[in-house]
Image (cartoon, grey):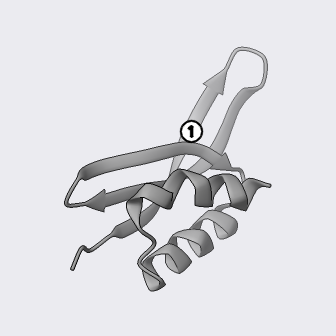
Amino acid sequence: MKSYLYQAFDELIVDAELGEYRTYGITLTSDAGVTSIHDISLCGETVVGAAARFNEHQLCGVHFRDAVEDLLG
C-alpha cells in the first residue's frame, strides 16, 4: 500500500509589483519522490486544513494538483 504525506509550509514571496507577502503551499512526499505546490493561498488555515484532509483520506499523488485546483475554484 502506498503512503502519502502532505505537509503545509509557509514562505515569504517578494514580487516587484506586489512587494513582500507570506503565502502557503503543500509538499507531498511519497514513494515517487517529493512534489511541492507553492503560493496556493494567503490563508494558512485553508492550506493546513487541505493538507490534513489529503492525509486523512490518503489522496493519491496523481490527484494532488487537481485537488489543489479544486480548492482554489
Judged from this view, the residue extending furthest toward the top is: 16
Q: Report the front residue among 63 and 51.
A: 63
Asked if 27 appears above or below 53 in the picture, the reply is above
Q: What amino acid does circle 1 point to?
A: Leu
Judged from this view, the residue extending furthest toward the bottom is: 56
Image coordinates of residue 65 in percent, x first then y, are 54, 51
Asked if 43 appears above or below 2 in the picture, the reply is above
Answer with left or right where residue 51 lies relative to residue 55.
right
Q: Which residue is mark 1?
A: 12
Asked if 21 appears above or below 14 in the picture, the reply is below
Q: Residue at x 46, y 85 (%)?
A: 56
Image coordinates of residue 41 in percent, x first then y, are 69, 51
Count residues near mark 1 (Cα–Cα under 10 Å), then give few for <14, some for 14-19, many for 20+.
Answer: few
The local secondary structure at tag 1 comes to strand
Image coordinates of residue 53 in percent, x first then y, are 55, 79
Quarter of the image for the C terminus: give it.
bottom right
Inspect this view and state whether residue 54 appears. Answer: yes
Q: Residue at x 41, y 67 (%)?
A: 60
Q: Quadrant of residue 31?
A: bottom left
Q: Report the front residue among 65 and 16.
A: 65
Image coordinates of residue 8 in percent, x first then y, are 48, 62
Q: Report the front residue among 36 and 58.
A: 58
Inspect this view and state whether residue 9 appears. Answer: no
Q: Residue at x 71, y 14 (%)?
A: 16
